[in-house]
Image (spheres, grey):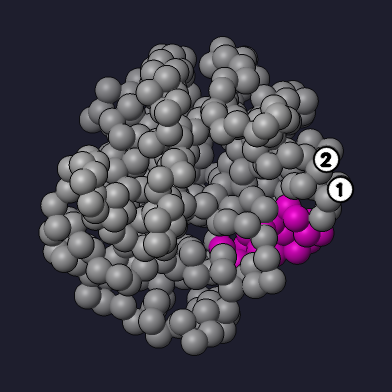
């Protein structure tokens, strides 16, 4: 089985196979990392201040689905009905206007957990909360206000998530935005309450500021997203969700001219990372306490080469020392059988012994 899966992974990667699978000289060495393992909860959280109920729910998540016992996770996130509008998200497959199909896809796809809104998960909680771990996404950016504004606001309470039997709560902070200070306070307080009640916490550490777009889009630079991750673990997120980095040098670009933005050290770019995507992602992992807090990367938008792109993202995340993938649109914007196949293809990367961590 392993050889078949490995062959499939190489075929999906195509001309990127050697570049991604053959990379063996990372800037940050493997021996500095806290890597995913079947004993991750004991190894990385048992000595923390998380209570026993949080440990139980973290174990529920890592012990579910096809990746159970590996330390890796595959999560289905479907909050795009609010974040991107329901029509835009579900027009490709209207079956997913029905909340139950979202949970069914996660179960059939062998996911560790399903992440969605209060409404989606609450509508089927009595039927499914005991069958797959629920992650309730608490805040959202809604796109009905005119003109559109970009802010994450709370759509419910931690107690609601607890009452429906959720294993974890999730939230987004738009680091770098004018609203980020308020969001940091709101989410920090919500996460503290969630931990008190025994739920785990997952933070979407996204950047949002028009000034981050210069010669490149530095919303996806390794240095800025890495710092966002570091802020996320500071407010005690148990898992960090981040976009895969596509470039580096955000701090340098924003400090050109007379600007004085943040603080950085040029060794970030020379000693701690390179332009290789695995090195860029490993810098994100480093900012999650060297992997003590797991990093999951997002799967991105659906397009023409979803399977190949999903495999490449999974390979980069795994080889960088990440904890897994959280992929939604690539899976639910197609027939359920194809969505299941895509999720399984991602999981095969994490199950393959040939995809190693250099």
Structural crowding at the residue carrying mark 2, measured as other residues with C-alpha within 10 Å and reported as few (<14), some (14–19) or many (≥20): some
* Residue 204 screen position, x and y as percent: 47, 39
> Compared to 52, does 341 lie above or below?
below
> Compared to 259, does 276 lie above or below?
below
* Residue 258 screen position, x and y as percent: 21, 46
Task: Give the residues drawn in magenta, as a range.
Answer: 330-346
In the rendered image, the quadrant that contains the C terminus is: bottom left
Left or right of 236? Residue 59 is right
Left or right of 137? Residue 229 is left
Q: Nearer the viewer, residue 220 or 298?
A: 220
Magenta region includes residue 341: yes
Q: Does the residue at mark 1 contact the one at mark 2 (Cβ under 8 Å)?
A: yes
Q: Nearer the viewer, residue 196 or 217?
A: 217
> Compared to 79, does 235 lie above or below?
above
Residue in the picture at 25% in, 69% down: 274
* Residue 154 screen position, x and y as percent: 57, 20
> What kind of secondary structure does the magenta stretch mostly adopt?
helix
For residue 94, the mark is 1
Q: Nearer the viewer, residue 284 or 1?
A: 284
In this view, which residue lies farthest toward the right? Answer: 94
Please tell me whether mark 2 sits on a helix, a strand or a loop: helix
Residue in the picture at 77% in, 40% down: 86
Residue that carries the numbered disc 2 in the rendered image: 97
Magenta region includes residue 174: no
> Compared to 273, does 295 lie above or below?
above
Q: Is residue 158 visible?
A: yes
Left or right of 249? Residue 178 is right
Determine the image quadrant of residue 341: bottom right
* Residue 46 screen position, x and y as percent: 28, 31
């Amino acid at each position: 089985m392993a050889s078949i899966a490995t062959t499939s992974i190489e075929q999906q990667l195509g001309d990127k196979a050697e570049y991604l699978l053959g990379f063996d000289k990372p800037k940050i060495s493997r021996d500095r990392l806290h890597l995913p393992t079947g004993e991750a909860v004991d190894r990385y959280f048992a000595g923390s201040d998380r209570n026993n109920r949080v440990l139980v729910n973290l174990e529920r998540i890592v012990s579910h689905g096809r990746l159970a016992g590996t330390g890796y996770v595959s999560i289905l996130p479907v909050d795009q009905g609010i974040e991107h509008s329901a029509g835009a998200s579900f027009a490709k497959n209207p079956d997913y206007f029905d909340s139950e199909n979202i949970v069914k896809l996660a179960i059939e796809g062998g996911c560790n957990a399903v992440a969605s809104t209060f409404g989606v998960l609450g509508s089927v909680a009595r039927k499914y909360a005991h069958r797959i771990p629920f992650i309730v996404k608490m805040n959202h950016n809604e796109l009905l206000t005119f003109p559109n504004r970009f802010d994450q606001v709370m759509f419910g309470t931690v107690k609601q998530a607890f009452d429906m039997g959720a294993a974890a709560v999730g939230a987004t902070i738009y680091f770098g935005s004018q609203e980020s200070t308020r969001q940091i306070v709101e989410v920090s307080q919500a996460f503290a309450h969630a931990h008190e009640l025994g739920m785990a916490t997952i933070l979407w550490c996204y950047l949002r500021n028009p000034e981050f777009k210069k010669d490149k889009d530095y919303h996806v630079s390794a240095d800025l997203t890495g710092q966002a991750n570091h802020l996320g673990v500071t407010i005690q997120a148990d898992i960090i969700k981040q976009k895969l980095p596509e470039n580096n040098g955000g701090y340098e670009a924003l400090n050109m001219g007379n600007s004085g933005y943040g603080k950085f050290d040029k060794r970030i770019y020379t000693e701690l990372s390179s332009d290789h995507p695995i090195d860029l992602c490993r810098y994100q992992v480093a900012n999650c306490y060297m992997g003590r807090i797991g990093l999951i990367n997002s799967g991105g938008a659906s397009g023409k080469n979803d399977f190949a792109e999903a495999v490449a993202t999974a390979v980069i995340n795994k080889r960088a020392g990440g904890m897994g993938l959280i992929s939604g649109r690539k899976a639910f914007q197609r027939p359920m059988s194809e969505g299941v196949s895509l999720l399984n293809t991602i999981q095969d990367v994490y199950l393959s012994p040939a995809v190693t961590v250099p």
